[in-house]
Structures are given as structure tokens and as C-alpha cells.
Image: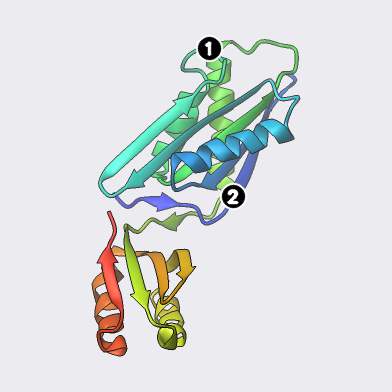
Amino acid sequence: MPEYTLSKSYTGDYKERGSSFHAVAQPTSDINDVKSSLLIMKEKCPDASHICYAYRIKKGKSLDEFSSDAGEPKGSAGQPILNALKRQYLINTGIFVIRYYGGSKLGISGLIYAYGIAAENAIKNARLKPWMAKKRLLVTYPYTLDGVMKSILKKNHAEVIYEDFGEKIDIQLDIDVELADSFIDIVKQLSAGSAQIIMAE
């Protein structure tokens, strides 16, 4: 089954008996992204009664799934958000649902429905893109190759994660698994062996 992810953030809303549920779906590559986003939302939404969330993060063949009820009854918030991600085969994606309490209790079934619908509404508003497995490479090359390398990186849609300018240029990059071997061959040919490439874990 093909898997999907997001290229940017999208939102969705749902209201029930005075309570409003604001969902934010966004791309995420690791747990630190999730923690950072949660802190930002807590600062921006001090009046929120709950900020519940779920994520699915894939690295290699390992899939990390997690959901948080954030004080709501167990299973009433995080799990329906996670289920919304699963139904659309979304990975490397997190959804936060910010609830503002409206004075009326919704009950377990009402909460499950509200959190789930808010999450689904954010996904409905989103533009999904096919997820491609990535390979991380470490490349070291002389400054004379900088222009050539920038061109190769662009043509192969490589994402530069880190750059260091010392005696030589060191970069970390993520590239689609399907493009990795041809990328390595091209770099070796055009650099005449002056570039070094290491596979990262």
C-alpha cells in the first residue's frame, strides 16, 4: 500500500456544544519536531483546555506511532487522531488538536468523534504527496566543485540537512533511495574521485 506525507502544515476545525477543536496537521521527521511544535502551541494557546496529538514517524523499516490524550479520558482523543493518520496512510506526519472547552461535557463517544473529525478535516484540506524512502549521505568535496555539486543536488532533488565549510565542504543530505546509487556514480565521475561519500546510518 502506498504511503503519503505532507510538504507543509494544514488546519481543520470542528465545533460541538460550545467546544471548538482546531487541528493542525504538519510534516515531522522526528520526535524533537513534535516536542518543539507542542511547546510552541502551548505558548500560543494558553487558553486551550487540552492539546492532544498523534504522530507516525518512519525511519528505514521502523515505524514509530504515538498518541497523547493530554488529560482527556483515556483513548478519547489521541487514538482517534492516530486513526485518522492511519486511514490515509500518512507517515512522517503529526496532528495536534487544540480544544477550547465550551462548558458542556461531550462524553467519551462525543470526544472520540470530535477529535477524529477535527483531525480528518485537517487532512481533507491537505495536499498529500507520496512518501519516498530516503537515504542519508555524507559528502566531502573541494571548493572548486561547489558549483557542480549544487547543480547535481538540485537535479536529484536532494535535501541538504547540514553544511560545514572547513578545509573542504562537508554536507549531510537526504535523497530518495531510488536516486541514491546514480547520484553517487555521478558525483564520483564529475569529481574524478576528489569527492568522498559515506552512507550514514
- Coloring scheme of the render? rainbow
Percent coordinates x, y for residue 92 in the rendering: 43, 46
Q: What residue is rendered at 28% in x and 50% in y?
A: 60
In the picture provided, is 172 more to the left or to the right than 61? right
Q: Amino acid at mark 1?
A: Pro
Reading the image, the residue beneath label 1 is 73
Give the x, y percent position of residue 63: 32, 40
3D distance between C-alphas at marks 1 and 2 = 27 Å
Q: Quadrant of residue 56?
A: top left
The reply to whether residue 121 is in sight is: no
Q: Is residue 137 above or below residue 121?
A: below
**Residue identified by numbered label 2:** 9
Q: Secondary structure at mark 1?
A: loop
Q: Which numbered disc, 1 or 2, marks the residue that appears first in the sequence?
A: 2
Identify which residue, 141 or 154, lies in the foreground.
141
Amino acid at pointer 2? Ser
Instruction: Give the camera-side residue of 11 and 67.
Output: 67
Residue 151 vs 136, above or below: the answer is below
Kindly identify the residue that appears in the image at 71 percent across and 11 percent down.
Answer: 104
- At x 63%, y 13%, the residue is 106
Q: Name the image quarter holding residue 172.
A: bottom left
- The image position of residue 153, as x and y in percent, is 41, 76
